[in-house]
Amino acid sequence: MLGTCLENVRKTVPLVHNITNYVTVNDVANALLACGGSPIMSDEPEDVTDITSICGGLNINTGTLNRRSIEAMFIAGARAKELGHVVLLDPVGAGASALRTDTALALMEKVRPDVIRGNISEIKTLALGSGTTKGVDADAADAVTEANLDAMVEFTRRFAEKTGAVIAITGAIDLVSDAKTTYIIRNGRAEMSKITGTGCQLSGVATAYAVANPQSKTVAVAAAVCLMGLAGEIGFAHLQPGEGNSSYRNRIIDAIYNMDAAALEKGARYEVR
């Protein structure tokens, strides 16, 4: 099932328009190429209508906002929805500032994304209308744990039902849910948090997976989350003495590039509720 999602990406090579933050834009592009997709980046308001029109999906990331990019997000989002394209919202830093929070909430309301992916603090901010984060990282008090897992599954499912979107919450335990089904995923390494942009990369990859699997977006996003976590495990296992987070970033992208359906099916650790 997950492997089929991977194969569909490789076969169809979905073109994804990314309005992402300039800290991680290169890594997002490389992760998309590695997974079998094709990236294009544009945040110029006069450009994005044309760019989004030729793509199959739109990945919106609020990590480094400015007035021009915000305008572009709404223009591209409206065009993507007109065309029936997949839209993913990555509300980076929602809860850290009024601009990020208000922009993410407005995008959620006006664009109505098909997928919303963020850490638990960002998702709680969108669900509640306000919140706090540790910069662009999740607040430790919000973490999804084995102790609060049942409550967090219910929270995620309710938010999915409210928004009509597939909700992906990533952290030590990942949750991917629509209104009926929740994937609980335990792939990944804590060391992935030492690399800037693994979440941004995942958002690009998840957009490609959702585009390539239009009839099963929830499974597709779960597959993308498993892929990223498993790549983190494989990349870490291949680190050599003296290598650190810079090498780790490259090894994660290499692991995504070399992943096949059988490896994903074998290595994915998840349960479905």
Image: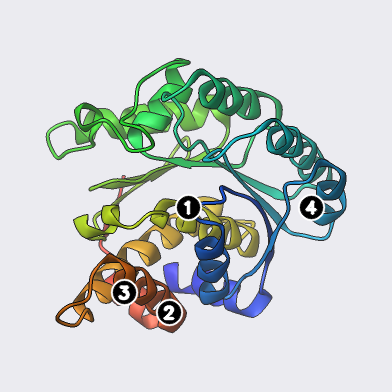
Question: N-terminal of the two: label 2 or label 1?
Answer: 1
The amino acid type of the residue labelled 2 equals Ala
Amino acid type of the residue that numbered disc 4 sits on in the rendered structure: Thr
Position of residue 70 in the picture relative to residue 248 (left or right): right
**Residue contact at pointers 4 and 2, CB within 8 angstroms:** no
| Residue 73 appears left or right of 204 | right
Estimate how packed mark 4 is, as few (under 14), some (14 to 19) or many (20 or more) residues with alpha carbons within 10 Å. many
Quadrant that contains the C terminus? top left
Q: Amino acid at mark 1?
A: Cys
Residue depicted at x 48% and y 32%: 160
Q: Say how many tags the image has.
A: 4
Q: Which residue is mark 4?
A: 52
Residue 219 visible in this rendered orientation of the protein = no
Image quadrant of residue 135? top left
Q: How far across and how far down the image is residue 111, in percent?
A: 70, 32
Please, what secondary structure does the residue beneath circle 1 have? Answer: helix
Q: Nearer the viewer, mark 3 or mark 4?
A: 3
Q: Badges 4 and 1: C-beta atoms under 8 Å apart? A: no
The residue that mark 1 highlights is 200
Q: Secondary structure at mark 2?
A: helix
- Element carrying mark 3: helix
Name the residue carrying label 2.
261
How far, Cα to Cα, is label 1 from label 3?
A: 18 Å
Residue at image x 74%, y 50%?
Answer: 85
Contact, mark 3 vs mark 4 (Cβ under 8 Å): no
Q: Quadrant of the N terminus?
A: bottom left
Residue 247 numbered tag: 3
Q: Seen from this angle, which residue lies furthest front?
A: 242
x%, y% of residue 237? Answer: 20, 77
Label annotation for residue 184: none
Mark 3, residues whose alpha carbon is within 10 Å: few (<14), some, or many (≥20)? some
